[in-house]
Structure formats: structure tokens, C-alpha cells
């Protein structure tokens, strides 16, 4: 069970990204994060789990158990897979109310949104929206 708050994990992510001076290195790190994303079950690669608004295909599934939300995801694009894996790292195993109240500010702190193409930035917004929608669904 995850006992750390999303803010604590997000601060860790910001610190990791701060060691890179160039965005090319940050992209490579994102790709590395995506390659370590656990494989999503094929039964979850369905149209209802596709995130709309993303240029590439991104599936996001969640399971609610023991008062926490557990995410799995996949994408057919390597950078997008890295982005969703970053979001899952911060919000996986969190309480719905902690996810719903999060401002996702670490995205701005690492400069991710401003260094993405407009279509990837829109996809990021859609991913965040879907994570928040799942949180609101299970919030008590």
C-alpha cells in the first residue's frame, strides 16, 4: 500500500528532472520511465479506456480497492507512454480525495507542458482529466 502523499512523490519527480539541463535528456528520461511501465492487461485495451483528446492511443484503467485507486496504462507512442507512467507514479495507490484535490503542479515545475508539442500538451491535459474523473467517481 502506498503511504506517501502525491505531493511527496511529485517532489521526488521534480528533483529527478532537475538534474537534467537539456530537454532532450528529460525526454530520454520520460522514455525510460515509459519502458518501465507495467504491462496493461489486454482486456483493458478497450475503446472505453482510451483517453480522448490524445493524438496517440492511450489506455488508462483503474481499480478501486481498499479505499485507494490503482492505475494501469499503456500507449502506442513512447513519449506519451512516459508521460502517463509519470502520472501513474505519482497517483497510483492514492486515496481518491487526494487525487481529486491535487493541482498536478509538478507538471509545471518540471516544465513538461511548455516543452511538449501542442497535441501532446492537449493529451497531457486529457490524461490529467481522466485521472481526476476516476478520483471523483470513487471519492466519498
Image (cartoon, rainbow, N blue to C red):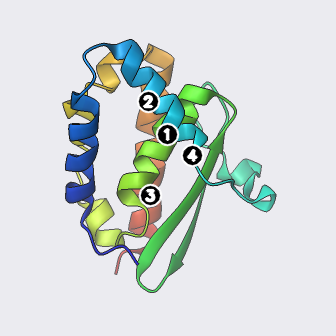
Question: Is there a contact, CB below 8 Å, between mark 4 and mark 1?
Answer: yes
Q: Secondary structure at mark 4?
A: loop
Closer to us: 20 or 65: 20
Please report contact status of discs 1 and 2: CB closer than 8 Å, yes or no: yes
Q: Earlier in the sequence, mark 3 or mark 4?
A: 4
Q: Position of residue 63 (x, y in %)?
A: 57, 72
Residue 33, disc:
1
Tell me if 133 is positioned left or right of 95 in this view: right
Name which quarter of the figure residue 76 lies in: top right
Residue where numbered disc 3 is placed: 133
Mark 3 closeness class: few <14, some 14–19, many ≥20 residues within 10 Å: some
Task: Give the farthest residue toward the front.
Answer: 19
- Residues at marks 4 and 1, CA–CA distance in whole angstroms: 5 Å
Pointers 4 and 2 in contact (CB under 8 A)?
Answer: no
Residue linked to disc 2:
29
Instruction: Calculate the distance from the C-alpha at mark 1 to the C-alpha at mark 3.
Output: 24 Å
Amino acid at each position: 500500500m502506498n503511504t506517501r502523499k502525491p505531493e511527496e512523490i511529485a517532489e521526488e519527480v521534480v528533483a529527478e528532472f532537475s538534474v537534467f539541463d537539456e530537454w532532450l535528456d528529460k525526454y530520454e528520461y520520460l522514455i525510460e520511465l515509459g519502458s518501465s511501465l507495467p504491462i496493461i492487461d489486454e482486456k483493458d485495451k478497450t475503446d472505453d479506456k482510451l483517453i480522448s483528446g490524445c493524438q496517440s492511443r492511450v489506455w488508462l484503467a483503474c481499480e478501486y480497492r481498499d479505499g485507494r485507486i490503482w492505475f494501469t496504462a499503456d500507449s502506442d507512442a513512447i513519449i506519451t507512454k512516459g508521460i502517463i507512467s509519470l502520472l501513474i507514479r505519482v497517483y497510483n495507490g492514492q486515496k481518491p480525495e487526494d487525487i481529486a484535490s491535487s493541482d498536478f503542479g509538478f507538471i509545471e515545475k518540471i516544465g513538461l507542458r511548455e516543452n511538449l508539442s501542442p497535441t501532446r500538451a492537449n493529451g497531457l491535459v486529457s490524461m490529467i482529466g481522466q485521472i481526476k474523473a476516476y478520483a471523483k467517481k470513487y471519492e466519498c
